[in-house]
C-alpha cells in the first residue's frame, strides 16, 4: 500500500473498523450532510471503510484516516481515488475534515501531501479534485493545491474540476 509521508501536523494511516464512530461524526454535521447525503444512510461508515479497503487492495491507495501527530486525535480523511469525470476515470485527491478541525489548514496540508505523493511516488500525469460549486471551503482548498479549473457535468449536475498536470507541478518545484 502506498501512503503519503507525514505532513507537518498530520499522520496518514489506513482505515480500520474502530474508525466508524468518528467517521460517521465527520458526516453528521449539516455542512457535510449537504454535500454527502448518502453518508447519513444506516451503515454508511462501515460501507465507506470497506470501500477504502478494496481500493487499497486494488490500487494501493484510497482515502486514509488523518490523525494529528501531537495527540492522535482524528481530524478527517484525505487521499487518492479514481473518480468518474467526463468520459473516463481520473485520479482525484479528496478530503473531509471534522467540523471541529475545519478552518485550521488541515485539509490543505493533507491534500498538498497527497498531491506530492501522487506525482512523486505514483507517477501520475494528471491529478484532479471534483468539487460541488456551492462548497466554498472545498473550492478554496482545491484552488490552493491545483492551478487550473474547468466545469464539467456529471449526471446532469455542473461540477468544478480543479486539476494539475505533471508538467505544471514540476515547473512549480
Image (spheres, rainbow, N blue to C red):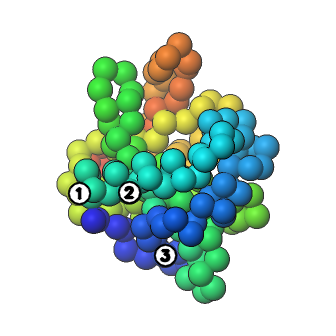
Residue indicated by mark 1: 122
Residue at the image point whose x is 34% and y is 67% from the top: 3
Q: Residue at x 39, y 27 (%)?
A: 85
In the shown orientation, is residue 121 left or right of residue 37? left
Residue 54 rendering spot, x and y as whole percentages: 34, 51
| CB under 8 Å between discs 3 and 1 | no
Mark 2 neighbour class, 10 Å CA radius: few under 14, some 14 to 19, many 20 or more: many
Is residue 53 something that shows in the picture? yes
Q: Nearer the viewer, residue 140 or 4?
A: 4
Mark 1–mark 2 Cα distance, whole angstroms, equals 18 Å
Closest to the camera, between mark 1 and mark 2, is 2
Task: Point out the frontmost of discs 3 and 2.
Answer: 2
Q: Quadrant of the N terminus?
A: bottom left
Give the residue pinned by disc 2. Answer: 53
Seen at 56% across and 74% down, the residue is 67
Q: In terms of secondary structure, where does tag 2 sit?
A: helix
Q: Is residue 145 visible?
A: no
Residues under labels 3 and 1: Cα distance?
19 Å
Q: Residue 30, position in %: x, y? A: 79, 43
- Judging from the image, what secondary structure is the residue with disc 3 in? strand
Q: CA distance from mark 3 to mark 2?
A: 18 Å
Q: Which residue is mark 3?
A: 11
Q: Give whichever of discs 3 and 1 has the lower sequence position.
A: 3
Q: Is residue 91 above or below residue 23?
A: above
**Disc nearer the start of the sequence (3/2):** 3
Residue 40, quarter of picture? top right
- The earlier-in-sequence mark between 1 and 2 is 2
Q: Residues within 10 Å of mark 3 (few under 14, many from 20)?
A: many
Amino acid at each position: 500500500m502506498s501512503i503519503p509521508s507525514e505532513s507537518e501536523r498530520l499522520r496518514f494511516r489506513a482505515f480500520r473498523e474502530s474508525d466508524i464512530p468518528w467517521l460517521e461524526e465527520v458526516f453528521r454535521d449539516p455542512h457535510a450532510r449537504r454535500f454527502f447525503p448518502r453518508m447519513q444512510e444506516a451503515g454508511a461508515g462501515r460501507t465507506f471503510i470497506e470501500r477504502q479497503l478494496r481500493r487499497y487492495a486494488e490500487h494501493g491507495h484510497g482515502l486514509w484516516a488523518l490523525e494529528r501527530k501531537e495527540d492522535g486525535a482524528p481530524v478527517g480523511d484525505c487521499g487518492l481515488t479514481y473518480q468518474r469525470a467526463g468520459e473516463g476515470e481520473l485520479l482525484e485527491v479528496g478530503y473531509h475534515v471534522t467540523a471541529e478541525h475545519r478552518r485550521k489548514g488541515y485539509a490543505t496540508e493533507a491534500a498538498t501531501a497527497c498531491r506530492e505523493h501522487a506525482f512523486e511516488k505514483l507517477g501520475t500525469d494528471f491529478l484532479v479534485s471534483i468539487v460541488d460549486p456551492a462548497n466554498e471551503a472545498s473550492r478554496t482548498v482545491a484552488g490552493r493545491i491545483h492551478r487550473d479549473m474547468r466545469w464539467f457535468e456529471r449526471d446532469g449536475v455542473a461540477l468544478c474540476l480543479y486539476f494539475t498536470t505533471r508538467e505544471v507541478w514540476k515547473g512549480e518545484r
